[in-house]
């Protein structure tokens, strides 16, 4: 069973600081769940892994392509979460030309575990990873989740049927006004 509110965790991110100079002007910045979700209207989608086919070819690009549509519906930010570290998330976004989606590394899997979405992907050599899902979060409260079917350890793959950008947009357009 998924929680009603997002877990209270600390995400270990890297942010650009041009004052550092050099070829790698980034520094560590810890972000709490309260900083990511507090007082904000957020769409988050979670993927099994950076650079994996469905995640790279469809899931992430779909949300990036529709970032303006989400903003027009009152969404303050679109967040991509993966059980990958900040370095991998940065390079993945860079390789795909991602500019609108905020890449949130859950390198230790703390958020994913507390969401009840952590699964084993040992058969593919991926270790512990997130199940594929998306959710709408208002001020830390989970309003709606779209979880891909077949939740289990070591699936042969995780399809993209319910957690795509189009499904989330349809839900946001059709939800009753607050």
Image (cartoon, helix red, strand yellow):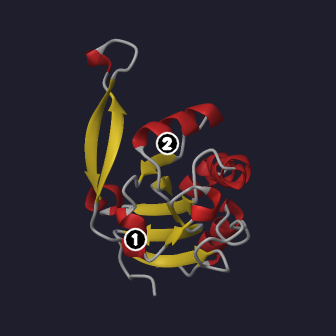
Q: Residue furthest top?
A: 22
**Circle 1 sits in a helix, a strand or a loop, which is it?**
helix
Query: Decide: marks 2, 1 in contact (CB < 8 A)?
Result: no
Q: Is residue 75 left or right of residue 146?
A: left
Q: Quadrant of residue 114?
A: bottom left
- Residue visible at 43% across and 50% down? 104
Query: Of marks 2 and 1, which one's residue comes earlier in the chain?
Result: 2
Please tell me which residue lies in front, 141 or 130: 130
Q: Residues within 10 Å of mark 2 (few under 14, many from 20)?
A: many
- Residue visible at 28% across and 50% down? 31
Q: Percent position (x, y) of residue 92?
A: 57, 38
Q: Residues within 10 Å of mark 1 (few under 14, many from 20)?
A: some
Q: Percent position (x, y) of residue 158?
A: 68, 67
Q: Which mark is residue 92?
A: none
| Residue picked out by circle 2 | 89
Q: Which mark is residue 113?
A: 1
Image mark count: 2
Q: Is residue 74 left or right of residue 3?
A: right
Q: Percent position (x, y) of residue 32?
A: 26, 56
Q: Quadrant of residue 59?
A: bottom right
- Distance from the alpha carbon under mark 2 to that under mark 1: 19 Å
Please tell me which residue lies in front, 141 or 56: 56
- Residue visible at 58% across and 75% down? 153
Q: Percent position (x, y) of residue 96?
A: 64, 36
Is residue 74 visible to us here?
no
Q: Residue furthest bottom?
A: 1
**Circle 2 sits in a helix, a strand or a loop, which is it?**
helix
Of marks 2 and 1, the one in the foreground: 1
Is residue 36 visible to us here?
yes
- Residue visible at 67% across and 71% down? 155
Vertical arrangement, residue 4 with respect to residue 155, above or below = below
């Amino acid at each position: 069973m998924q929680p009603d509110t997002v877990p209270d965790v600390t995400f270990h991110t890297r942010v650009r600081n041009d004052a550092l100079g050099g070829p790698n002007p980034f520094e560590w910045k810890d972000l709490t769940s309260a900083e990511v979700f507090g007082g904000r209207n957020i769409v988050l989608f979670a993927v099994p892994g950076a650079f994996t086919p469905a995640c790279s070819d469809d899931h992430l690009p779909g949300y990036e392509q529709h970032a303006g549509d989400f903003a027009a519906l009152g969404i303050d930010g679109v967040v991509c979460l993966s059980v990958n570290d900040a370095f991998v998330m940065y390079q993945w976004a860079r390789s795909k030309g991602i500019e609108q989606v905020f890449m949130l590394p859950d390198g230790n899997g703390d958020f994913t575990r507390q969401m009840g979405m952590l699964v084993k992907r040992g058969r593919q050599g991926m270790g512990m990873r997130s199940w594929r899902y998306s959710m709408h979060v208002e001020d830390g409260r989970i309003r709606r989740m779209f979880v891909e079917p077949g939740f289990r350890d070591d699936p042969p793959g995780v399809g993209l049927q319910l957690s795509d950008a189009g499904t989330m947009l349809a839900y946001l357009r059709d939800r009753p006004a607050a």
